[in-house]
Amino acid sequence: MEKMGLNELRKAFLDFYVSKEHYKAKSAPLIPEAGDKSLLIINSGMAPLKKYFSGQEIPPAKRMTTCQKCIRTGDIENVGKTSRHGTFFEMLGNFSFGDYFKRESLTWGMEFIRDVLKMPLDRLWATVYLDDDEAFNIWRELGMPEDRIVRLGKEDNFWEIGLGPCGPDSEIFYDRGEDFGCGKPDCRPGCDCDRYVEFWNHVFTQFSKEEDGSYSDLAHPNIDTGMGLERIACIMQGVDSIFDIDTIRYILDGVLDVSGKDYEKEGTETTDVSIRIITDHLRSMVFMIGDGILPSNEGRGYVLRRLIRRAARHGRLIGIKDAFLSTLSDRVITVSGEAYPELVEKQELIKRIISIEEDKFAQTLDQGIDIIGEYIKDMKSNNETVLKGELAFKLYDTYGFPVEVTEEILAEEGFTLDLEGFNANMNLQRETARKGRKTDDEEGWKGASNLDIPQTEFIGYQTLVSDSKVLAVETDGEKTVIYLDESPFYAESGGQVYDTGIMSTDSARAMVISVTKQGGRFAHLLSNVEGEFKTGDLVHAEVDARRRHKIARNHTATHLLHSALRKTLGTHVEQSGSSVNDKVLRFDFTHFEAMTKEEIEAVENLVNNSIEEFLNVSVQETDMAGANKLGAMALFGEKYGDIVRVVSCGDFSVELCGGTHVSNTGEIGAFKILSESGIASGVRRIEAVTASGILEGYNSETERTSALSTILKTTPDLLMQKTENLMASLKQANSELESFKKKSMGDSVSTLIENAEDINGIKLITKRLDGATTDDMRSLSDTIKDKTSSVAMVFAAVNDDKVTFLVSLSDDLVEKGLHAGNIVKEVAKVAGGGGGGKANMAQAGAKDISKIDEAFSVAKALIK
C-alpha cells in the first residue's frame, strides 16, 4: 500500500471515475440551494444531488463524481476529545442516476482499491444487507472470501429516511490488525472495537417505501456512494488520528508554533484537546466564510460564530493572548487552495471577517469569564451544582456570551447548566418581541382567514383598475373590510407596502387605506365609507396610480442596490430584509463591518449608472429549475411556490420577486443613499430615496441651511466658514476648561491623601465627584497611586440622575487579597446598581444618588 497525501487521494478518486465516463462536478457551496429548506448547511455528499435523485431536476449526466465540502456540528462536544471527530470533512462520491447499478459500483470500487490505492486485499472486509444475495454474490465473484462478507440487518446496512426511495447498502472495511481489536473470537465488522474501519459505503437505491410500509421496485435504481476523504487518508498514511493527516497536521503545527505548546506528550492531554479543537474549527470557519457565510446570531451565521468563538477561547486556554485565528487561516488556504480556488480568491475577505469576529469576542470574553467565576463562587458557597438558566440567559442577552461557551466553562469546573431554563427565557423574549410586532389591524382581522370564500386573484401586474365582485364584507362598526374575487390592489408582502386607492359602486364609495393577505384572500380595509357595500356587489376598484409608481420605482431600486452591493462588497452580501413604500426604501443585508464613504459612493454610482442606461425590466414566470438556469437570486428562508417570477433588470440584476416594478430602469430617475448603519451583528441597513424623494430631501436641506444661516447670522455660502470658526473657538474653550479641571483635581490630591481614613494601615479615600467622567476618576486614582501606597479609593461620579462608582486599589492591597471587582459589586448594590471588573480597578453604575453615603459606608465595612 502506497502512502498518499490527502490532496493526492482526492485527485486520484475523481480521475478514476472520470475514466469511467463520470461527469466531474465541482463541490457545491456549503449553503444549500434556495429551494432546499431541509438543511441549514450541506452535511453529506448526496445532499446537493437530492434534486437529481428525486427527479425534480435532470442531472448534467447520468454518471457523476464529486468531492463535497461538508459541515456537521452534531458531535461538536466530542471534537478534540477523540481522534476522529471533526466539524468539517470532505466526502468523495460516485453516483448513478438510473444508469449502472450494483455490479458496476462494486466492481469499480474494488478496482480503485486494488489498482489505485494498492491496499492489501487480505485486509478488506465487506458488509451487505441480510437479504441482499446479489451484493453477496458480486463480492464473492470479485474475490472477497465468504468469511469476510458479513450480513447485517436493517440498522447497519439499509438506507431509508421516511417514505420514498430507499435500499440496501454495502460497506467496505479495512482491518487495522489484532492490536486494535477487542480479542473476542467473533470480532469482525459490526463489533464496537476500533479494529475494523468502515471507509466506503455503496447505497443501492432500488426500492420505494410506501405509506402502508411495503416496498415497491423503482423503475430506475440509483447508486450513491460516499467515502470520507479524511478517513481514507488515515488508512493510506498509516495514522490513527485525522489530526495526523498531512494537510491537517500542517494546520495543527501552526497552532503549536503560535502557542509554543507540546503535543501528545505526557501531561498535555488537556492542552491536546484545545489544540485539536482550534485545528478543526479553523478548517470549518475558512470554508464557511469562503462560501459566503457570515457570523450572526442565528442560523448558519450562528454556527460560524460559535466555531470562531470556541476556537478563540481554547486559544486563551493554552496561553495564546493575542488574536491568532486570522493568521492561521493562511495555513488552511495553503493546503486546500488548489482544490478550492475560491479560498484563494477570498483569502483577504476570510481573514478580515475572522479577525473582526475574534476581536469582538475578545472584548466580551474576559468580562464573561469573570461573571461566570462569580456565579461558580456563589454556587460553591450555596452547595449548588447547576447554574440557573436565567443567569446564563442574562450573560447571553446582555454581554453576547454564547451559551455553549458558558456550558463548557461550567463543565470544566464540574458544574452544569439549566439549559431548559435558559431556553425558556429565550422563548419568552422571542414571544414578547413577536407580540410587540403585531398591529391592532392584524389582531382585528384574525378571523378573516376562516372565511369560506375563494382566494383572491391578483390582477395588479396587468392593470390598476377593475370591476370586481364582492365575496364578503366584514364590519365591526368602526372598521369595514371587503374581499373581492379579483383585485388590482397589491397586498402587503415581501417587504413591499400595500396599495391604496378608491372602491365604489352606484350607491357606495370608500377609500382603500390598507390591503393584507389573509390565507390567500385580500382584505381591503376601508375608510370614509359612504353608503353600504354588500356581498355580491360589483365594485369599481381603482389603485392610486401615482403612489403605485413611486413604490415600483423604489422596489426596482432595491434590486439594483442588492446587485451593486454584491459587486462592490462581495458575493457574501445577501438580503436579510427590506421595506419599500412610496417615500423611502430600506434594505438590510449581510456584511461584517460598516461601509466606507468610498464604498457607499461606489454603490450609489453603480445604481445610478444602471438607471441612466435605461435597462429593460422584464418578468418571466418559470419553475425553480428554470429560475436557477437564469441565474436568479433567491432569498434563503423564503417560501417559493411551484411557479416563480424572475425579475431581470437587463443583465445587471436577476432576482426572484413577487412585487411590482417599473418597466425600464430609466423610470426610477435617480438614486440617493441617505444612511448606512448596523442593526445587528453582521447585518447592515441602507436607507435611500429615488426620483421626487431626492428633490424633497434637497428642498428640506435647503430650508435647514437657510434657517441655520439665520441663527448663526451669516449667509448660506459662508455657513461652512462660520461653523469652522465657532468650532475652533469651542475647542479652545474646552481645552482651557479641561486644563482647569485637571489643575483643580491635582490640587486636591494631596488633600485627599491627608484626609484619608486609616483602617488597619489602609488609607481609605471616598469622594463624590459631581460632573466627573469615568476617565476623570481613573486619572485621579492613578495620580493618587503614584504618590502613595496601601490606598483604597471609592469614587462616585454624579451626572444628571445617575451615579457611577469606581473602586481602585494600589498593587500591594491586591497582593494581600483585596479585589476591586468584588467591592464595587457590593457598593453599587446599595444604590440599586451592579457591575464588576478586575482586582485593581472596577466600576459599576447605579440609580439612587441618595444612597452614595450609605454605599461609602459599605465600602468601609468591606475594607475592615
Image: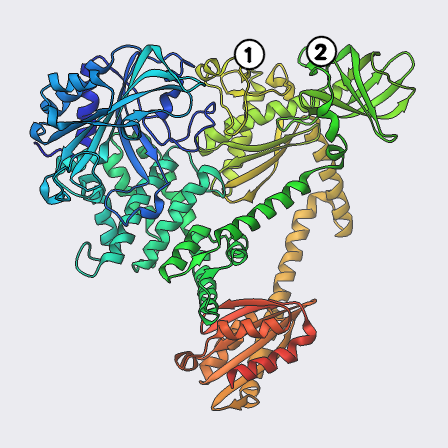
> Which amino acid lies under the numbered mark 1 shown in the image of this protein?
Glu
> Residue 621, which numbered label?
1
Q: Kindly identify which residue carries mark 2.
A: 463
In the image, what residue occupies the spot 39% across and 26% down? 161
Q: Seen in the image, is 759 located left or right of residue 137?
A: right
**Residue 430: % across, % down:** 59, 44
Above or below 533: residue 40: below
Identify the residue at horizontal 71%, vertical 39% (top origin): 701
**Image side of residue 824 versus residue 351, left or right:** right
Q: Quadrant of residue 527?
A: top right
User: Taking the image as drawn, is residue 7 in sight?
Assistant: yes
Position of residue 693 in the picture relative to residue 315 (left or right): right
Residue closest to the eye, 579 or 344: 579
Image location of residue 155, percent across then percent down: 30, 30
Q: Position of residue 679 (x, y in %)?
A: 57, 43
Q: CA distance from mark 1 to mark 2?
A: 18 Å
Residue type for callout 2? Thr
Between disc 1 and disc 2, the foreground one is: 1
Q: Nearer the viewer, residue 210 or 430?
A: 210
Total marks shown come to 2
Q: Position of residue 571 (x, y in %)?
A: 44, 30
Kindly state the secondary structure of the residue where label 2 is placed.
loop
Q: Quadrant of residue 734?
A: bottom right
Q: Classify the position of the N terminus by image quarter.
A: top left
Is 260 situated above or below 688? below
Relative to 852, residue 246 above or below: above
Whether residue 469 sits left or right of residue 240 in the image: it is: right
**Mark 1 or mark 2, earlier in chain:** 2
The answer to whether residue 749 of the structure is visible from this angle is no
Observer-nearest residue: 687 or 263?
263
